[in-house]
Each structure stands twice: as C-alpha cells, then as structure tokens.
Image: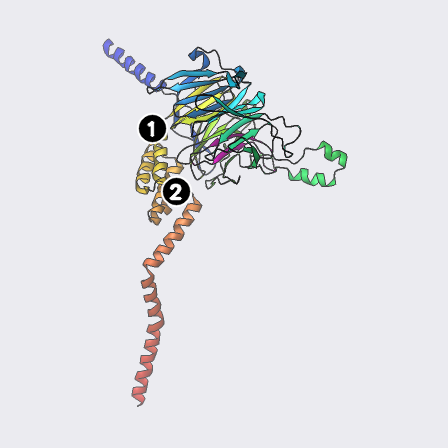
C-alpha cells in the first residue's frame, strides 16, 4: 500500500513537471462579437539571449534587430556597436563578431548609437548610424563603400539634422530611410546614395473640432495651436516581394484608434495592404486602463512572412499580433511584465524561417519564439490555400478545429476552400456559422448563379408549360366549337 501511494505521488509529480515545462504565453483571438477568446499557444519561448551569455557584457539600450539567413544582427545602440550572432545547425546561438567602428579612408570611424541595420540580397550592409548623422554602406566583409549624410535639398526643413532611425533597401537597391523630424514620408536614395525624394507620406490627421476652431481663431491663437501635419513612421520592413511594410502611431480624427497603423507600400508609395477581415489590423479591439496602460495598441515594428501573413509588435501592451494575407487576426500573444515571453519596452521584431525574434530595450535582451504544432498547422493551411491546394487546406483547417473548436478562422478557411472548389452550399454553411457576411454573400451569389445554370431548362420548361398549355387548351376549345358549329 505504501509503495502504491509513493508511485501515485511520483506520477503526479512527473505530470506536473510536464505541464509546467510548457508555460503559456497568453495566446488569444477575437470572436465575431469582439470578445477575447483564449486559444492554444501558437508560439513558445525557446531562447532568451543576453549579452553576458556571449562574454561581451550587457546589451545597453538596444534599438535595432535584423535577421538574414542564420545571422542575427543586434544594434546595441547604447554601447555604440553592432553584435552579430550566428545560429548553429543545432539551434545554438554563438557570437560571430562585434563591430564598433568602420574603416573609412584608412581611418577608424566609431559608430555612434546605431539604431538599425539592413543587409540586402547581394549582401551589402547598410547601417543607420544615428548619432553620427549618416547612413553607411558596406560590403559583405564590412568594408566601407560610401556614406550618406544630410542631403542639400530645399525640401528638407532647416531643423532636420538628419538622424536616420530605420532603413530598408528594395530589390532595385533603392534605400528608404525613416529620419527623425521628417514627416513627409520615407526619405528615398538611389543605389549611389543620391537623394531622390520622399515615399509613402502619412495622411494628415486632425480632429474636426480643432479644424472648426481654427476657422474662427485669431492669428495669435493659431500660432499656439498644433499644426495639422502628418506624423512620422516609427519602423519599416521589407517583404519577400520587395514591398515596404511600415508602422506608425497616427491617430484617427477622434483620437481613439490608430489610422491604418500598418501599411504595405508599393513603389509609388501607395498603401496596398488588404483589409478584408472582421476588423482592420489595428491590434487590440477592446482595452482598459489597468496597470497605467491606456489607449489602443501602438505598433512599433512589423515583419512579413513568405505566405503574406505578417506580425506586428505592440509597444503599448507588449503583444505580437499575427495577421493573414486578408488582414484577419490569426492570434495574439505576449504582454507587459517580467514573465517568460513578456516584455518591458518592445522595440523590434524579425524572423528566421517561422521562428520569431524580438528585442526589448529595457530587458536588453533578444527573445526567440518557436512555432508550436498548433501555430504550424495554421501556417500550413494558409500555405496550401495560397498554393491553390484548396482541398488540402480544408483538411488542415479541420485538424486546427480539433485543437481549438472556437477558432473562427478555421471555419472561414474551410468555407474559403469550399468556395474555391465550387462547393458553394458548404461554403455558405461554414460562413454562416461564424457570421462571415461578406463571404456568405459571395457564396450565395455564386450558388444562385450555379443553380440557375443547372436548372435553366426546368425553368424554361415550366414557363413554356405556363404560357403554352393555356393557349393550347384555348385553341383546342375554339377548334372543337368551330367543328360543332360546322
């Protein structure tokens, strides 16, 4: 008996250990009624990287994060350096190099609070060397090629001192930089580093009450009022097709939610991001004022995946919001706090394959999140749909439903696949379950058209019977009458 009790307690201890070995990162989604619905974790923490782990001292106020292949570039801004980490085939992180200066014309030039780095497809490295007021272009061996400083252009305001904060380089080697104090859009430079203009300016945001007040205000009052000027972007990223993703904290006219806080810009600076979900991609749909945190989500960075889904990093509440190619929220996770997978001051996000890397300036650490089986199935379903394999996509969504029966997008995904396969009634059923009116309306329209085409001969036959039979009967009666009269 005593042995049995001991074995029982041992089994409970082992089960408890297994449970606590996989902590939740508080993953959730929103349903049709804008209520949070808890879901299985799509990502879990797999590594927490501090500078001390690589014998280089603590990171200090890091501000930038970039990933290419198996290299992780950390802009250790407070230490005026760039730290390059390498991921081994076994998944370990080792130190590759530390860059404190660049050799320019035979002389060492120290970095000063570098805030971002970008390495393009041909391996050229670009550094936003912020406090040196310059952008550096280097080759793959970190040899200096040229330097971009403040352009001599009349479109640049006199007070702008050219502090580049974030940058990307597109497939045509055009450099787009977010510069402090510039609200005309991203500053654009050609492949030689020459300034060519601005791209993707934010729309002007103002309150209607302020606009009306300005109409009646005196000149002195107008001077004391805030000007109606567009706000600046706060981060930019490049997707696999060469489009620029940008985040900003522009508020709506009523000051309640951000106005398109994430955008996808084409070469003309036009926003082409698709927003066909229940709600626009704005982060949290409802929020409170607990813990000294108030207001809507504030996206501080974005990273795009190969299947056109993208993850936005919220600096207000330390959450990561993942959206699909239609703008549907797939899931959200994270928070502000000291727990594993939580953040203090989020500043940057990037990815290595499906793994997400985040940077926190207060923790001075990089956190790696690896996708779970649940998250991978969602990714696989999206990939299959994008590849045109609709039946396979629907089957994977069925597996997702087994893991989370309340996942609205699984129902919508099955309906979407059925719609592509011409199974309009099935699509209508799944869309109706989750109140997806737009999808239901489209499925119903196609179902009605299909039904009309399949039953047109029946309709024509009935019409013919309704029209011709009475006429035939009338003619027969008339003919019989004429015969009798004859």
Q: Nearer the viewer, residue 468 or 64?
A: 64
Q: Residue 335: in sight, yes or no?
A: no
Number of numbered discs: 2
Q: Is residue 17 left or right of residue 314?
A: left
- The image position of residue 215, as x and y in percent, is 72, 41
Question: Are the residues flagged by discs 1 and 2 in contact, CB closer than 8 Å?
Answer: no
Q: Earlier in the sequence, mark 1 or mark 2?
A: 1
- The image position of residue 252, as x and y in percent, is 58, 37
Label placed on residue 433:
2
| Residue at horizontal 25 percent and vertical 12 percent from the top | 7
- The image position of residue 381, as x and y in percent, is 35, 36
- The Cα–Cα distance between marks 1 and 2, rounded to whole angstroms, is 25 Å
Residue on which disc 1 sits: 373
Q: What element carries label 1?
A: helix
Question: What coloring was used for the rendering?
Answer: rainbow
Q: Does the magenta stretch include residue 233?
A: yes
Please rate how many residues cluster around mark 1, counting C-alpha atoms within 10 Å: few if below 14, some from 14 to 19, many from 20. Answer: some
Q: Which residue lies furthest to the bottom in this view?
A: 486
Query: The N terminus appears in which quarter of the rendering?
Result: top left
Q: In this view, does 108 lie above or below 211?
A: above
Q: Give the range drawn in magenta.
A: 229-253
Query: The C terminus appears in which quarter of the rendering?
Result: bottom left
Nearer mark to the viewer, of 1 and 2: 1
Q: Nearer the viewer, residue 396 or 432?
A: 396
Q: Does the magenta stretch include residue 307?
A: no
Label placed on residue 66:
none
- The image position of residue 339, as x and y in percent, is 45, 18
| Residue at horizontal 33 percent and vertical 80 percent from the top | 475
Q: Is residue 85 above or below residue 298?
A: above
Asked where in the image residue 158 lies, by quadrant, the reply is top right
Q: Residue furthest front?
A: 106
């Amino acid at each position: 008996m005593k042995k049995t009790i001991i074995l029982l307690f041992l089994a409970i201890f082992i089960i408890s250990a297994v449970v606590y070995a996989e902590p939740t990162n508080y993953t959730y989604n929103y349903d049709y009624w804008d209520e949070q619905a808890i879901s299985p974790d799509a990502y879990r923490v797999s590594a927490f990287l501090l500078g001390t782990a690589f014998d280089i001292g603590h990171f200090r106020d890091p501000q930038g994060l970039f990933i290419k292949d198996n290299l992780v570039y950390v802009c250790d801004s407070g230490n005026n350096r760039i730290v390059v980490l390498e991921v081994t085939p076994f998944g370990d992180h080792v130190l590759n190099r530390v860059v404190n200066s660049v050799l320019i014309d035979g002389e060492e030039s120290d970095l000063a609070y570098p805030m971002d780095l970008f390495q393009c497809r041909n391996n050229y490295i670009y550094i936003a060397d912020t406090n040196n007021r310059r952008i550096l272009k280097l080759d793959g061996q970190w040899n200096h090629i040229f330097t971009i400083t403040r352009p001599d252009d009349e479109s640049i305001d006199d007070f702008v001192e050219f502090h580049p904060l974030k940058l990307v380089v597109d497939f045509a080697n055009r450099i787009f930089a977010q510069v402090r104090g510039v609200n005309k859009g991203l500053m654009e430079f050609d492949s030689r580093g020459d300034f060519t203009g601005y791209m993707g300016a934010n729309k002007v945001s103002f309150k209607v009450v302020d606009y009306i007040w300005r109409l009646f205000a005196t000149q002195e009052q107008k001077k004391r009022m805030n000007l109606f000027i567009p706000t600046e972007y706060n981060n930019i990223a490049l997707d696999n097709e060469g489009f620029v993703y940008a985040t900003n904290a522009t508020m709506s006219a009523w000051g309640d939610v951000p106005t398109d806080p994430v955008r996808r810009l084409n070469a003309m600076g036009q926003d082409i991001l698709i927003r066909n979900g229940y709600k626009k991609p704005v982060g949290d749909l409802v929020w409170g004022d607990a813990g000294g945190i108030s207001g809507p989500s504030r996206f501080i960075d974005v990273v795009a995946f190969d299947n056109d889904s993208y993850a936005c990093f919220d600096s207000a509440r330390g959450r990561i919001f993942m959206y699909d190619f239609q703008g549907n929220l797939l899931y959200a996770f994270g928070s502000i706090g000291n727990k594993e997978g939580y953040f203090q001051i989020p500043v940057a996000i990037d990815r290595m394959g499906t793994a997400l890397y985040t940077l926190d300036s207060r923790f001075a650490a990089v956190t790696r999140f690896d996708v779970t089986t649940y998250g991978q199935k969602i990714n696989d379903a999206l990939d299959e749909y994008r590849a045109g394999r609709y039946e396979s996509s629907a089957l994977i969504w069925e597996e997702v439903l087994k893991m989370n029966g309340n996942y609205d997008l699984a129902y919508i995904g099955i309906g979407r696949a059925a719609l592509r396969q011409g199974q309009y009634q099935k699509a209508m059923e799944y869309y109706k379950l989750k109140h997806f009116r737009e999808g239901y309306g489209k499925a119903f329209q196609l179902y009605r058209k299909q039904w009309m085409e399949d039953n047109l001969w029946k309709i024509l036959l009935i019409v013919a019977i309704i029209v011709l039979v009475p006429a035939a009967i009338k003619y027969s009666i008339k003919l019989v009458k004429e015969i009798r009269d004859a």
